[in-house]
Image (cartoon, helix red, strand yellow):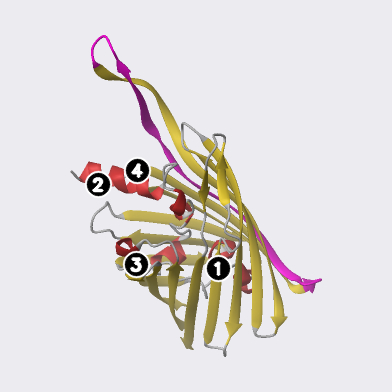
Amino acid sequence: MKAIFVLISALLIIPPAFSAKYAGESFSLGVGGRALAMGGAAVAGPFDAAAGYWNPAGLNYVNGRSITAMHAETFGSLLNHDFIGYACNRNKNIGAIRAYGFYFYYLGGGGIKITGWDAASNRPVILREVTHGDYLLAGSISGKIKDRIDFGLTARIIYRDLGVSKGYGFTVDAGALYQVNHKIRLGLMITDLTSGYIRFTQEYSESILPTVKPGLMYEHSIRDFTLRVALSGDIKFEGIKYASQFWVGDISLDTHLGGEVSYKEMIFGRLGSDIGNFTAGVGLNINRIKVDLAYLHNSDLDATFRISAGYRFK
């Protein structure tokens, strides 16, 4: 029974061709051990080289040049989930641009059996096995409007391979940050701002609807210790209702909450809640190398560990 539930959940995460309203869901699983251990509450920070994914305006808060990568096997090795991101902040404006970044995101797996019907034996037969995957290549830029206001844009190219058909799409994300004071930062991210479609080789397409993500981060330091508390929400307009935490009509809300305590910005402990699911993690930052581990609990599916590693260039 559990295996059947895992399979059904995977099909929901990687929507089939007829689930046209949820074409962008496979890119919403989150990236980076730090953010995921904090429940995915990363719209207002803290930021690293994955800022282009969470909020491109956050690239302004990444120091210098850095890279981060993540690999995970999700839901009992059913899916492979990979990410690599690069960020560069020169701390000076080139025109209106202050920082930029790129990232690549992959979610997929194999073992999908394509079956047919053998008339002689009157039984189904396996014709072949195929793989499936969602691929996303993105480029981000960020700048400052005023000292306290940052903005960012991300352009995303999508390629979807369902095993039996393939499709392409393009969307744009937009983000903004407002530094209220030295402790509080507000964030806003709109994914798939332009809406858009994934168009397949056959005569059909999947729509991608925008998601509005407000967020907040609070930071306070006492001697060698720093506390960060972050929260954010995903506001969708897809009428998913019972699949969300809160909903009114076609509008739904899912919440993310997380906290982090660091010692000398070298050792980190984290807790969070990702749409009501418990998360936790640890991190280590030595010289220019950082490693983050996240534990994601799910009461129905197997728990997931996600590890990411990063490097900051000179």
Residue found at x 40% / y 60% = 293
Marking on residue 190: 1
Q: Main secondary structure of the magenta part?
A: strand
Element type at mark 3:
loop
Marking on residue 5: 2
Whether residue 107 is in magenta: the answer is: yes
Residue found at x 65% / y 82% = 149
Label 2 Cα neighbours within 10 Å, binned few <14 / some 14-19 / many ≥20: few
User: Residue 295 at x, y = what percent?
Assistant: 34, 60
Q: Which residue is mark 3?
A: 275
Q: Disc 3 marks which amino acid? A: Ile
Q: CA distance from mark 4 to mark 1?
A: 31 Å
Q: Which residue is mark 4?
A: 77
* Direction from residue 166 to residue 238 in the image, left or right: left
Element type at mark 2:
helix
Q: Who comes first in sequence, dot 2 or dot 3?
A: 2
User: Residue 115 at x, y = what percent?
Assistant: 34, 24
